Amino acid sequence: MKTLHTLIAIVFALPLSMHAQSWSTSGNAGLTTANFLGTTDNKALIFKTNNRENGRLLNTGAWRLGTATNFAKIDTTGKLTFGGTGVYVVGDNKFIFQYSGMPIKDCF
């Protein structure tokens, strides 16, 4: 009976001594290349505020800012694309877009 009580005590105490690494909202120290914020499977990393999606780091490595229907996307080559019905203002209500077949010097 004493062995059973010891075994039960070990089983219940074991989970209390085990813990996963957690990320602090006030910063972390001692990080190495083994530490990261992300996924270990082939899934996107989703960023939300107020439980609403505002961006994703896609499993392809591209960044999508905005929602699935209105977004700006930057791929791993640095190419910026837009999707949806949003209006994209560069500054002073001036818009600059380049047609992929036209060198930028010919756009002005």
Image (cartoon, rainbow, N blue to C red):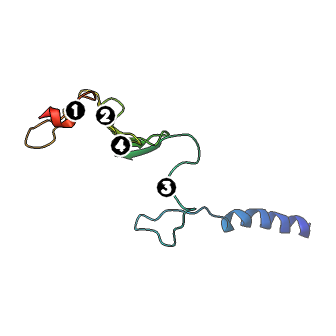
Q: CA distance from mark 4 to mark 3?
A: 22 Å
In the rendered view, tell whether residue 17 sits above or below residue 77: below
In the rendered view, tell whether residue 33 sits above or below residue 92: below
Circle on res. 98: 1
**Which residue is under mark 3?**
37
At numbered mark 3, what does the secondary structure look like: helix, strand or loop? loop
Q: Mark 3–mark 1 contact, CB under 8 Å?
A: no
At numbered mark 1, what does the secondary structure look like: helix, strand or loop? loop
At numbered mark 2, what does the secondary structure look like: helix, strand or loop? strand
Q: CA distance from mark 3 to mark 2?
A: 25 Å
Question: Neighbour class for label 3 at 10 Å: few (<14), some, many (≥20)?
Answer: few
Q: CA distance from mark 4 to mark 1?
A: 14 Å
Q: Mark 2–mark 4 contact, CB under 8 Å?
A: no
Type of amino acid at the residue the image marks with label 2: Thr
- Nearer-the-camera pick, 29 or 9: 29
Image quadrant in which you'd find residue 2? bottom right
Question: Neighbour class for label 2 at 10 Å: few (<14), some, many (≥20)?
Answer: few
**Which residue is under mark 4?**
78
Q: Earlier in the sequence, mark 1 or mark 2?
A: 2
- Nearer-the-camera pick, 62 or 41: 62
Q: Residue at x 46, y 65 (%)?
A: 24
Q: Earlier in the sequence, mark 3 or mark 1?
A: 3
Q: Going by the image, does 56 lie left or right of 108?
A: right
Q: Mark 1–mark 2 contact, CB under 8 Å?
A: no
Q: CA distance from mark 1 to mark 2?
A: 11 Å
Q: Position of residue 14 (x, y in %)?
A: 73, 65
**Which residue is under mark 2?**
81
Type of amino acid at the residue the image marks with label 3: Leu
Image quadrant in which you'd find residue 82? top left
Residue found at the far left of this picture: 92
Q: Residue at x 46, y 43 (%)?
A: 61
